[in-house]
């Protein structure tokens, strides 16, 4: 029986019924991660990329108190246009939004929850949340990590931005038993760049090998996710030194303005975009499309 809060698009419902491969997609990246209209254009292009690779996209969000897996073009347009007026919704926000019949843009954590309820195992995003720089005093650790620890969905990302403490993020994932797989690379990528100075746990070179690892993982224990790190294509990556300076500046600005809690990631993203004169946005779009393609290939390979 379907979960009382879940609402599938006709396309997602048909795909689940026919056992076709599906790929879940998040909506915080639409409402809070990119400006309009590039956010909507990208979200639609991501869906097309998934379809072209032979899978069915299910963009997730909370609309009128329902957990949606699969959105119409109008719904994506609505989220994109209303941007930061749509509450960013992670695990802790769900009960409130559902009880009030409200809308929400889903983070990696809450998209994993919806994907799991819908029986979708693979999810593509840009970058995940993690342990923030300075977390030793702020304790700002994204709920995405705890979700990866508990919920059986594999997340394809371009690593994580160095707005985070990548070393501590990887330590946290190790403690929680989340395997970090590098697609065709031994390096953990840093979102805008292909290397971070940190290594992944395992390198796998084909979508089929990744699908096999996931099969083994969930046969062994049905709990918990995996992180698939897919580096940004060479031609789209930004200069590592420039990004390090830009991110340090953005983090310092956030600190000065007293930005905290769930506002910090969206603040840093738009600050970085501003500081790079929009170049970071082009890279962001390129890597999301790249992740959508790999996620679809893994979903098809299962
Ligand atoms: N990192 C990015 N881009 C994003 C996000 C993170 O590079 O768009 C979004 C994702 O939706 C992620 C969320 O799940 O921010 C993490 O927010 P927080 O750190 O507040 O948990
Ligand atoms: Mn946080």
Image: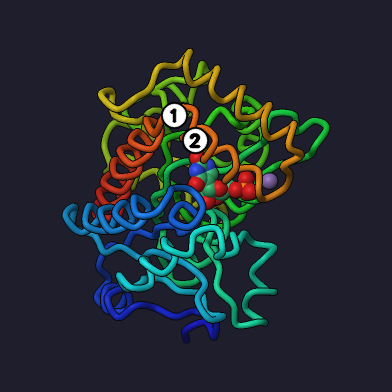
Which one is in front, 280 or 56?
Answer: 280
Which residue reaches farthest top?
Answer: 241
Residue identifier under label 1 = 202
Locate the C terminus by quadrant: bottom left
Give the residue drawn at x 73%, y 44%.
260
Q: Is residue 266 above or below residue 138?
A: below
Residue 254, percent from left and from top: 68, 35
Q: Residues within 10 Å of mark 1 (few under 14, many from 20)?
A: some
Between 233 and 220, the one nearer to me in the picture: 233
Marks 1 and 2 sit apart, C-alpha to C-alpha, by 7 Å
Q: Residue at x 60, y 82 (%)?
A: 101
Query: Element under label 1?
Result: strand
Q: Is mark 1 within 8 Å of ligand 1?
A: no
According to the picture, the residue beneath numbered tag 2 turns out to be: 180
Q: Eyeballing the image, is 5 above or below 91?
A: below
Q: Is residue 86 above or below residue 167?
A: below
Secondary structure state at the residue bearing disc 2: strand
Q: Quadrant of residue 77?
A: bottom left
Work out which residue is located at the far right of the displayed protein and give it: 137
Q: Answer whether residue 225 is visible to the viewer in this image.
A: no
Residue 123: x and y in percent read 41, 54
At 43% from the left and 41% from the top, the residue drawn is 157
> Which tag, 1 or 2, sits closer to the chain's start?
2
In the image: residue 203, left or right of residue 66: left
Residue 232, by quadrant, is top left
Residue 139 against residue 32 in the figure, above or below: above
């Amino acid at each position: 029986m379907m979960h009382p809060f879940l609402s599938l698009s006709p396309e997602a419902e048909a795909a689940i019924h026919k056992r076709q491969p599906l790929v879940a997609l998040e909506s915080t990246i639409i409402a809070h991660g990119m400006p309009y209209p590039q956010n909507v254009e990208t979200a639609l292009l991501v869906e097309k990329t998934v379809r072209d690779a032979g899978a069915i996209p299910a963009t997730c969000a909370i609309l009128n108190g329902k957990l949606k897996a699969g959105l119409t073009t109008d719904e994506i347009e609505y989220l994109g246009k209303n941007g930061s007026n749509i509450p960013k919704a992670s695990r802790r926000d769900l009960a409130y939004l559902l009880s009030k019949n409200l809308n929400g843009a889903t983070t990696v954590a809450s998209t994993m929850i919806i994907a799991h309820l819908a029986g979708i195992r693979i999810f593509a995003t840009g970058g995940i949340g993690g342990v923030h720089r300075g977390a030793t005093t702020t304790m700002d650790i994204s709920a995405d990590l705890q979700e990866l620890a508990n919920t059986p969905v594999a997340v394809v990302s371009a690593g994580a931005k160095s707005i985070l403490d990548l070393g501590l993020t990887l330590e946290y994932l190790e403690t929680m038993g989340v395997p970090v797989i590098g697609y065709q690379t031994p390096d953990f990528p840093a979102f805008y760049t292909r290397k971070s100075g940190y290594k992944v746990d395992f390198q796998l070179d084909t979508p089929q090998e990744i699908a096999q690892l996931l099969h083994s993982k969930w046969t062994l224990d049905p709990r918990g996710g995996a992180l698939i790190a897919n580096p940004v294509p060479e031609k789209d990556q930004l200069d590592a030194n420039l990004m390090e300076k830009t991110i340090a500046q953005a983090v310092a600005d956030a600190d000065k303005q007293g930005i905290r809690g769930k506002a910090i990631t969206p603040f840093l993203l738009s600050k970085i975009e501003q500081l790079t004169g929009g170049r970071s946005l082009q890279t962001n779009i390129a890597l999301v499309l790249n992740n959508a393609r790999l996620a679809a290939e893994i979903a098809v390979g299962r």
